Each structure stands twice: as structure tokens, then as C-alpha cells.
Amino acid sequence: MKVTREQVVENRRRILDSASQLFRSRGIDSVTVAEVMQCAGLTHGGFYRHFASKNDLVAQALGHSMKADIDRPFDLPGYIDSYLSSHHRDNPGLGCPTAALASEMRRQNPQARAVMSSGAHLVLDTIADAVSAPVAAEGRQAAIGSWAAMVGAIIIARAVDDRKLSDEILEETRRFILSAMT
């Protein structure tokens, strides 16, 4: 039976959704192509109709998840609250690809690293545009410092086994960033 163009597009989206969620949840190296295809509800044999290799899938899944990380219109206080939440901390497969995968990027191929860099530019530009600063350079500085603090806070909050400390890290980072931006 012939697959329609619409079904090919939908299958590709399902693969990218599954891969990006699995990579963020478990790490890139611990996820196989077969697991991605199974999660997407497709056969392993169809993988190469969509991607040249696992490296290609990694880069495209990163791009797919990074575009979804920034909503339009952008609400900076809402983004900070959502990012520094227990829901984000507890659900890495649904969260920020940078917080979930940054430590793995140095071992990935140049294509994946380039996609991560493009995503970082997108996030930083979006945050900088939302910051009220008299000079653009100050908005960029605030964006970089705030986003780095947010990513670091999520990573640390996920790493500690003390729930109270984890919650405190998220809350104090949120408070610090919001006070710095006013």
C-alpha cells in the first residue's frame, strides 16, 4: 500500500518527537534507533527513508525540540516560571534540550553541535529581545546570565537527591533572575 505524502510527513514528525523525548530522558548514547522507531510506532526498516544515520537523527531531533522550546508570543516571566518549575525538573524528556543534553554535546558530531549552537542563539536572542535594557548589550548580557543560571539550576536540581534543596535551588534562582531584571 502506497504511503501518502501527508503520512510520510506525519511519520517523520512522530520519529522526531520520539527521538527528542528519548534523547532528553535517557541520553543520546543510551538510545538506539530501534527504540526510537518502536516508540514512534514504526518499523526499524523505515528509518533510513527519513534519516541518513543516527547522527543525522540526533541533529534533526535537537533542532525539532529546540524550536519547540521557545513559544511565540514570548512571555519572559512565564518562561522563567515554567523553566524553573518542578514539572520541568521532573520531566526532562519534555523539557529543555540544553539542560538535558548540554554535557553530551562535546562528544557529538559537528552537525549536532551546530544545531545546539543555533538553538542557543535563538533562546538568547528571544530572551534579550524581551529584556528591558537601555542598551542592547546589557539586554544580551542579562539574557546570557539568566539563561545560564536557569540551565544550571535545572541541572543541579535534577542531580541532588534532596527534594527540599532541589526546590530551593529552583525557587532562589527564579527569584534571583526576576529581581535582577527589574
Image (tube, rainbow, N blue to C red):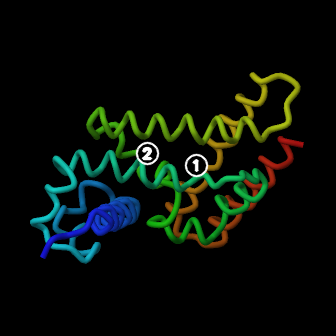
Q: Find residue 143 and report its image quarter.
A: top right
Which of disc 2 and disc 1 is earlier in sequence? 2
Question: Which amino acid type corresponds to the residue marked 2 in the rendered image?
Answer: Ala
Q: Find residue 71 and report its image quarter.
A: bottom right
For the C terminus, the quadrant is top right
Residue 144, given in percent of the width and then of the height, sits at 65, 34
Question: Which amino acid type corresponds to the residue marked 1 in the rendered image?
Answer: Val
Residue 96, given in percent of the width and then of the height, sits at 52, 55
- Residue toward you, 3 or 58: 3
Residue 64, given in percent of the width and then of the height, sits at 42, 53
Q: Find residue 154 and report its image quarter.
A: bottom right
Q: Is residue 176 visible?
A: yes
Q: Can residue 22 be seen in this view?
A: no
Which residue position is annotated with label 2?
Answer: 102
Secondary structure found at label 2: helix
Q: How many marks?
A: 2
Residue 23, given in percent of the width and then of the height, sits at 34, 59
* Image point (29%, 32%), residue name: 110
- Residue toward you, 182 or 152: 182
Q: Are marks 1 and 2 in contact (CB under 8 Å)?
A: yes
Alpha carbons under labels 1 and 2: distance apart: 9 Å
**Side of 73 where 48 appears, left or right:** left
- Residue toward you, 140 or 118: 118
* Image point (35%, 46%), residue name: 104
Pointer 2 local density, CA inside 10 Å: few below 14, some 14–19, many at least 20: some
Which residue position is annotated with label 1?
Answer: 151
Which residue sits furthest left? 45
**Side of 121 where 59 appears, left or right:** left
